[in-house]
Amino acid sequence: MPGRVHHVSFMWVVLAVLGCLLACTMPAQAEQPAPQATPSGAESGAVDNADENLRDPAALAELKRATDFLTALPRFHIKATVVYDVLQEDDRLLQFEKHGDLYLQRPDRFFADIFLDDGRHRQFWYDGKTVALAERSRNLHTQIKAPPTIDETLDLLEGLFQDPMPLADLFYSDLTPVAERAFEADVVGDSLVNGRPCRQLAFRGETVDWQIWVEQGATPFIRKLVISYRELPGTPQSVALIEVWETPEKFSDGLFTFAVPDGSQWIDLLILGPRRSEGGGQP
């Protein structure tokens, strides 16, 4: 009989000494981390002695136009879908999907509402002092002390969760590492993303490749992001499509404020393991 493939396999890890974690000790890790979606963070530091002949100035200029525009936005709302591969123990790549909304207000507010393809529903609140997390589909929640800026808080969350976050690098206040860590940069050409004219850019770092689709015109929103992990067997990918960009004058006062959901149970901390095949899929 073929091995049975679970759509999702995960574990809950309760950390008794939360204070040690927040004091920058090593966070608990999942059994086998899923690849992290960090086109700029997969390599430590900028690429040294990059051959400038491989870095098309037009690609770098278009990337800078997009990242400067994004970091100058005081607040925004996006609606996105992320499709990502997870390497199984038998070396197969299985593909999963999640979608949701993110609301960000610089320098110290965000709220995320995320739905996974197995039915799980997660929400995250950050108000400049704490991060609250709710697993709505299981009526579980937690709240931890957080750093005073979005950048530092994203670093904290990246350490806690071994789960693809291909959009996270776009939320930092400084996006210059996205270009600095590329030793190749190319303009692929014009492309349509959901009917919108975009310019497709391709980059190569030491261990990952990434592609970015920048909307043409006066508002260079990033409409698509693809990350390929060359160092992993099978070269798994994360693909993010951003269907909606909104830049309102203000958000409601309560959007970033956590309120305990009715019937929800407190846990100390929640860490999800990667999805994998239980039976190995062998005949």
Image (tube, helix red, strand yellow):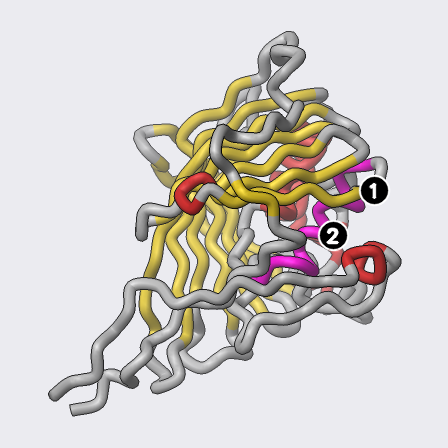
Kindly indicate the quadrant of the structure image that contains residue 242.
top left
- The residue closer to the viewer here, 18 or 235, is 18
Residue 64's spot in the image, x, y percent? 69, 39
Residue 237's spot in the image, x, y percent? 43, 63
> Is residue 157 magenta-colored?
yes
Number of numbered callouts drawn: 2
Can you tell which mark lies on residue 147?
Answer: 1
SS at mark 2 in the image: helix
Residue type beneath disc 1: Pro
Can you tell which mark lies on residue 280?
Answer: none
Q: Is residue 190 visible?
A: no
Region rendered in magenta: 149-162
Of the two numbered discs 2 and 1 in the rendering, the one whose residue sits closer to the viewer: 1
Vertical position of residue 188 compared to residue 87: above or below: above
Q: From mark 2 to mark 1, how far is it between C-alphas?
A: 10 Å
Marks 2/1 in contact by CB < 8 Å: the verdict is yes
Q: Residue at x 54, y 40 (%)?
A: 134
Mark 1 closeness class: few <14, some 14–19, many ≥20 residues within 10 Å:
some
Can you tell which mark lies on residue 155?
Answer: 2
In the visual, does 153 lie left or right of 19?
left
